[in-house]
Amino acid sequence: MNMTNPSDSGPAGIAIVLLLIYGLCFGVIMVMALVLRFVAGLFRAERDEISDKTREEARSDKRIIMICAALAVAPILVISLNSIGQIDFIDIALITATEAVAVFYITKKV
C-alpha cells in the first residue's frame, strides 16, 4: 500500500487540510445553528402577515454566519496544538475564553 507522511506534503498541503477541516466545521456548525433557529421559530408566536426579510432579520443572518465562522476556528486551534504535542487544560481554557470574547464582540458589534 502506498503511504505518505504529512510532513512530506509541505506547508501548503497542511494548510489545505486545515482549510478543509475549517470548511467542514463551519458547515456543521452552520447547519446546527439553522436547525436551532428553525426549531425556535416554531415556538414563536405566529405573525399576522408574511413579509420579506426585514433589516433586522438580514442582520441576524449576518450575525449567525459570523458567529459560526468564529466558532469554526476552535477545532483548528485544538488540532494544531495537538499536532505539536502542546495541548493542556490551560490551552483549552484559553481557546474557550478567546471564542467567548469573539462571540461577545460579534454580538455587540453587528
Image (spheres, rainbow, N blue to C red):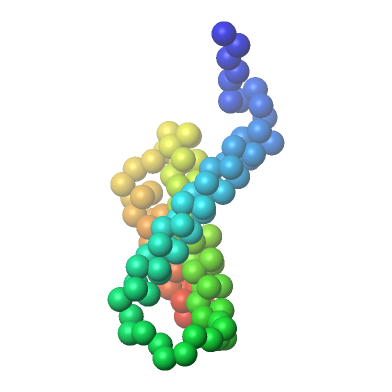
Quarter of the image holding residue 97? bottom left
Residue occupying image coordinates x 43% and y 73%: 104
Residue occupying image coordinates x 61% and y 25%: 7
Q: Residue furthest top?
A: 1
Residue 6: where, in percent of width, then height?
58, 25
Residue occupying image coordinates x 53% and y 86%: 51
Horizontal arrangement in the rendering, residue 14 relative to residue 51 (left or right)? right
Q: In the figure, 12 relative to 44: above or below?
A: above
Q: In the figure, 17 relative to 57: above or below?
A: above
Image quarter of the N terminus:
top right
Horizontal arrangement in the rendering, residue 19 relative to residue 82 (left or right)? right
Residue 58 can be seen in this image: yes
Residue 81: where, in percent of width, then height?
46, 41
Residue occupying image coordinates x 53% and y 66%: 65
Residue 101 can be seen in this image: no
Image quarter of the C terminus:
bottom right
Viewer-side residue, 37 vs 102: 37
